[in-house]
Image (cartoon, grey):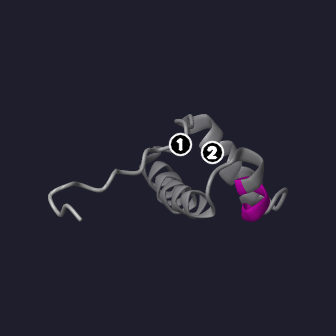
Amino acid sequence: MDKNKKAPYRKRNGSEVSFDLKISIIDEINNGQISANYASKKYNISRSTIDYWNKKLATFHSKSKAMSKD
C-alpha cells in the first residue's frame, strides 16, 4: 500500500439549480402540494439539500419582509 497516494475525490454529479426553481420547489412543499420526499425524487435533488434550501429561504423571506417599507 502506498500511503503517499491521495484518495480520489468525489465529483459532484448534480447541476446548478436556479433560484426561481428553488423557490418554486419550496413553495410547493410549504403549500402542501407535494412532500419533500416526492420533490427529491421528482427533481433529482437530495432531501437534505431541500431541507437546507427551506431553512435558508425561510430566513430570506423573513428578512425581505422586515426590510420592506410597507
Secondary structure mostly seen in the magenta stretch: helix
Q: Amino acid at mark 2?
A: Ile
> Which region of the structure is painted magenta?
36-40
Of helix, strand and loop, which one carries label 1?
Answer: loop
Q: Looking at the image, which residue is at 63% across and 62% down? A: 47
Look at mark 1 in the image and give the residue it sits on.
13
Q: Considering only vertical position in the picture, is 8 above or below 37? A: above
Nearer to me, 10 or 3:
3
Q: Looking at the image, which residue is at 55% across and 36% down? A: 15
Name the quadrant containing residue 48. Answer: bottom right
Label of residue 59 in the image: none
Q: Position of residue 56 (x, y in %)?
A: 48, 57
Q: How many marks?
A: 2
Label of residue 23 in the image: 2
Q: Considering only vertical position in the picture, is 15 above or below 67? A: above
Answer whether labels 2 and 1 touch (C-beta < 8 Å). no
Measure the alpha-carbon separation of dots 2 and 1: 22 Å
Nearer to me, 44 or 27:
44
